Amino acid sequence: MDRRRFLQTGCSLTAMTSLPAVVGATAQPSAPPAFRAFLDTLLPRDRFGPGASELGLVAPTWTGLGALPSDRRFMQDACRWLDQQADRPFAELTPSLRQRLVQWMAERPPNEPPSLFYTRVRDRAVMLYYRHSEIQARLGMPHPPQPRGYIDDLMRYLARHDG
């Protein structure tokens, strides 16, 4: 595959994963409470800004990750699995217990379902989070972090604020 073909394919895949579902697609059920809690564990409220659910990222993240029926089933199964990991649903766990479970998921081998769920959700949610205008303004970013990358912007921000 030549470079031009590779870039065209990459752009097409990026567009497919970042655009909303197409007209005529069947309506998806709303995200379960475990998903909202998972997102807020990944991207919690902190000194830089609001958490994922406060920014309204639950629905677009859920919708983007469940565009295909098999993906939707995977997401629903993963949320049920989260709810079965303790004596109460994931959303009702303390923040430290949720963080411990999410950390465990992040450390699993990449082909295991907990790791796949963690990685898919993290990648989509982080992209949406840093693309949000409120977060960009709070971090002093003059543009969305991608496709240029956010490391340079973060370094400039830290240099301005760490004195």
Image: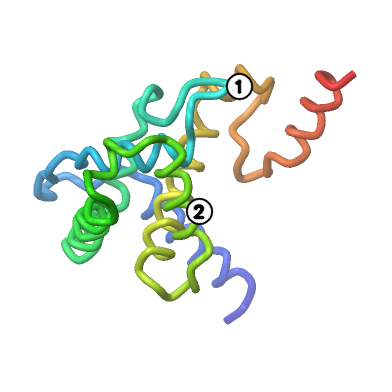
Left or right placement of residue 6 versus residue 29 in this view: right
Across the whole image, how many numbered discs are drawn on residues?
2
Q: Tell me the SS state at disc 1.
A: loop
Q: Tell me the SS state at disc 2.
A: helix
The residue drawn where x is 40% and y is 51% is: 121
Disc 1 to disc 2: CB gap under 8 Å = no
Coordinates of residue 84 in the picture (x, y in percent): 22, 55
Which of disc 2 and disc 1 is earlier in sequence? 1
Q: Quadrant of residue 48?
A: top right
The residue drawn where x is 66% and y is 23% is: 139
The residue drawn where x is 48% and y is 59% is: 104
Coordinates of residue 61 in the picture (x, y in percent): 34, 42
Q: Nearer the viewer, residue 94 or 15?
A: 94
At label 2, the amino acid type is Gln
Residue position marked by numbered label 2 in the rendering: 103
The image's mark for residue 8 is: none
